[in-house]
Amino acid sequence: MKKYDLLRSGDSIIRVLEVQSDRVLVIDCIKRAMPVWIDTVALDSYSECTISELTEITGTIIVDVDTLDASERKVMYERYTMIAPILAFIADERMRSSLICSVATEHDISKQTVRNYLCLYLAYMDVTALAPKHREDDRQLTPDEKNIRWALNKFFYTTKKQSLMTAYTMMLKEKYCDALGVLAEEYPSFYQFRYFYRKTRNLQNFYISRDGLKNYQRNNRPLTGDGVQEFAPAVGVGMFDATVCDIYLVNEAGSLVGRPILTACVDTYSGLCCGYSLSWEGGVYSLRGLMLNIIVDKVAWCQKFGISIQKEDWNCDRLPATFITDMGSEYTSENFEQIAELGVKVVNLPSYRPELKGLIEKFFDLVQESFKKHLKGKGVIEPDYQERGAHDYRKDACLTMADFERIILYCIIYYNSQRIVESFPYSEAMIAAQVKPHASQIWNWGKSQIGSNLIGIGKRELMLTLLPRTTGRFSRKGLRVNKLRYHCDGYTERYLSGGDVTVAYNPEDVTSVWLLEDGTYAEFTIIESRFEGKDLTMVQELQTSQRAIVKDSTRDNLQAQINLAQHIEAIAGGANGHTDVQMKNIRSTRRREQTKRHRDYMKEGTSRE
């Protein structure tokens, strides 16, 4: 018998921990109680045992350290570190108890837990015995638990957002009451109901079932994406969005108009505002204004509003080669996607992913924060504007659109050229070039680097690309577009041969349309001059009104045709029929009849009667 030997007698297995002349310190490997001293003669009935016999009886599997994952190894070694100081004094009961108390206090666990770890290790003498065990819950749900799960799914995980107590009450009503509604003698308590809910709760299911998928994606979904850094390795990636400004405006006569719409493009690399559009209309209309503003000379643009800036303060007159937009209808329309013909790539972000366009959202926040604190009491909306009894901020409105656009321009200039961009990831080259932490300076530096991607484009080509398109048809009457006829010299053969073509048109003025073939635009002018200068809606209203007038006269026209037929038939029926028509001397007969029917119109016209 040696130290650490395993000995077995029947179903009892012990391990020898210390050997003295007449007594032995052993631990019961089955019960795993604290080691005790026994007389040596008490072990005469025991025989040697193997670790495999011990594991077979206890049902414990001793695994290899390499098969454990990092978290399991961490827990295993932490537990061994706790009991390691005690192992040297395992034979000294007094010292052992003192160390157990110290370890329990140091690690903020109970003394019994320390004893359990100690006995577990001594029983197997293997550190892997301290590794946490996998808990596989294959237990079938009880009838009560099935009822609780049913009630949670039916009454709690719904968009009605009922409380746990309500779901519990409904469960009792549906599952634990008889036909008369009397509650049964035995039923789960609310504490059991709540315990099952907490044990099985899945937060993703909780948010989606009660608030909906859209709300979950917008407000609760884990934000693990890299954001705009995925799209902006260099200058030339523009992010588009629009917002309704938090201010009410009036017209020149002082009448309330409402809140204007600000549409903007921000370069996602530098944060520079490439252009903006301030208008009363949103959608594709505001996008056209934004596109024109992006490519305009900003110095000349600001000069129109009496604002003087330097070229380097807003040096943007080209389109970004990549557009990042959300799933707004104006950005997903075929009309807007035509801009890809200029070499622009349009990327539509997934729905409800505000973190992917955080830069443009922050731009709107900063611009509005810049003017709102200075315009309080002048139509600016405060956070309480939708609450009952809140002040009516519409009554404070006093600025016109022209005034407000000047304010917006000043805010954008500050945002571009004077605001400090603290979080921009400076490269070594930028530090060496001493690039100042302003969006305009980062933009100017980025434009000169390899990888910047900007597209130069003229106003006419840009606007023609953004015009809506339809199908036109050549015919002998010209090019027919939107039920109007157009003409251009040099297309005689096309008029005669006919055929369908693609045509761009301006809904605001039907005077001209543009035939699109092979990437070039040919202008056709309207043939019906009465429609010149009118917008398409007005022309369609005129055409509709004309058709209505014609339709209203259809019955009278049919009645007139019937009356005409009756008159003709009556006259024809009263004529004497001649069975033998004389065919000789037709000329002389015609002269006699001319003499009979001849009238002196001059004499009749000058007569005084």
Image (cartoon, rainbow, N blue to C red):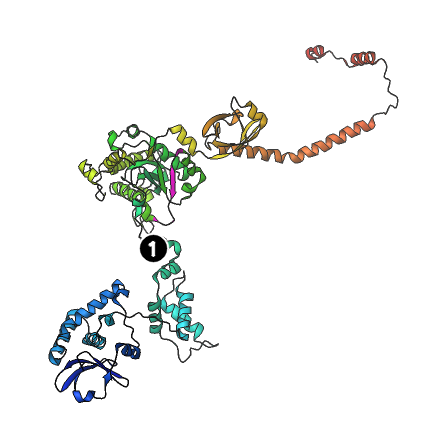
At numbered mark 1, what does the secondary structure look like: helix, strand or loop?
A: loop
Vertical relation: 402 (above or below) 386: above
Please state which of residues 165 and 506 is positioned toward the viewer in this rendering.
Answer: 506
Please state which of residues 2 and 542 is positioned toward the viewer in this rendering.
Answer: 2
Rendered residue at 42%/79% (across/down): 184
Residue 553 appearing in the image: yes
Whole-percent x, y for residue 114 in the image: 19, 74
Vertical relation: 32 (above or below) 572: below
Residue 267 horizontal side relative to residue 110, left or right: right
| Magenta range | 342-353
Quadrant location of the C terminus in the rendered image: top right
Quadrant location of the N terminus in the rendered image: bottom left
Please state which of residues 201 and 310 is positioned toward the viewer in this rendering.
Answer: 201
Q: Which amino acid does label 1 sit on?
A: Arg
Residue 347 covered by magenta stretch: yes
Residue 62 horizontal side relative to residue 323, left or right: left
Rendered residue at 69%/34% (across/down): 558
Residue 358 appearing in the image: no
Rendered residue at 33%/48% (across/down): 354
Residue 395 covered by magenta stretch: no
The answer to which quarter of the image holds residue 307 is: top left
Vertical relation: 597 (above or below) 20: above
The answer to which quarter of the image holds residue 411 is: top left
According to the picture, the residue beneath numbered tag 1 turns out to be 221
